[in-house]
Amino acid sequence: MSLGERLLDLRKKSGLSQEEVAEKLNVSRQTVSKWETDQTVPELTKAKLLSQLYNVSYDYLVSENPIGGDLTSIEMIVDEIDWTSAWSKKYPILASYQGINGINTYCEKISELYDTFKDEFDLNDTDAVLILKDILYKKYKMEKKKNK
């Protein structure tokens, strides 16, 4: 992702218009547009202000590597990661469990539970996943402790 593409993506995720960014940085809207289309690059002081405006590290903003050193920049790419593939290297069962005979029944049951849980507590998808993950993790920890 180029610097311009990254700036455009960050601006859209922050819900700001080019005019609003320009006003906050004391530049013209056309300047912001040129940055976002890779026609020009922001000077160092403006890049630092942009990183603060978008709440990302300066390194994340200017680096070719999309993973920065701060939590905010990591959170921004988390949805783009294939977690099953990533964790399969450490936990091979994740790459193969879909082939287990009868697993689809449990997938359907868990999906129904998820939908019911989300609706009953009026949760968005992210909150529902995080809470259910936390509940399962606590169960896992209790079982692990019990089996010691």
Image (cartoon, helix red, strand yellow):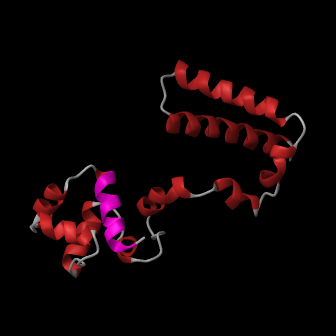
Q: Based on the displayed image, in which of its 4 quarters is residue 32 positioned?
A: bottom left
Q: Is residue 82 left or right of residue 73?
A: right
Q: Quadrant of the N terminus?
A: bottom left
**Magenta residues, start to end:** 2-13
Q: What residue sits 81% from the left and 44% below the top?
A: 98
Where is residue 101 shown, x and y percent of the image? 90, 38
Where is residue 89 shown, x and y percent of the image? 76, 63
Q: Based on the displayed image, in which of its 4 quarters is residue 111 positioned?
A: top right
> Residue 142 versus residue 104: which sits nearer the camera?
104
Where is residue 140 shown, x and y percent of the image? 75, 41
Q: What residue sits 44% from the left and 77% below the top?
A: 64
Q: What residue sits 13% from the left and 61% below the top?
A: 24
Which residue ends up furthest to the right in the rendered image? 101
Q: Is residue 103 left or right of residue 15?
A: right
Question: Does residue 75 sit above or below 6 in this rendering?
Answer: above
The secondary structure making up most of the magenta span is helix
Where is residue 121 shown, x and y percent of the image? 51, 22
> Residue 148 versus residue 112: which sits nearer the camera?
112
Please say whether residue 51 is one of the residues in the magenta stretch: no
Total labels drawn: 0
Q: What residue sits 13% from the left and 57% below the top?
A: 19
Question: Does residue 63 sit above or below 80 in this rendering?
Answer: below
Question: Does residue 85 sit above or below 31 in this rendering?
Answer: above
Please say whether residue 4 is one of the residues in the magenta stretch: yes
Which residue ends up furthest to the top in the rendered image? 120
Q: Is residue 72 left or right of residue 136?
A: left
Q: Based on the displayed image, in which of its 4 quarters is residue 105 positioned?
A: top right
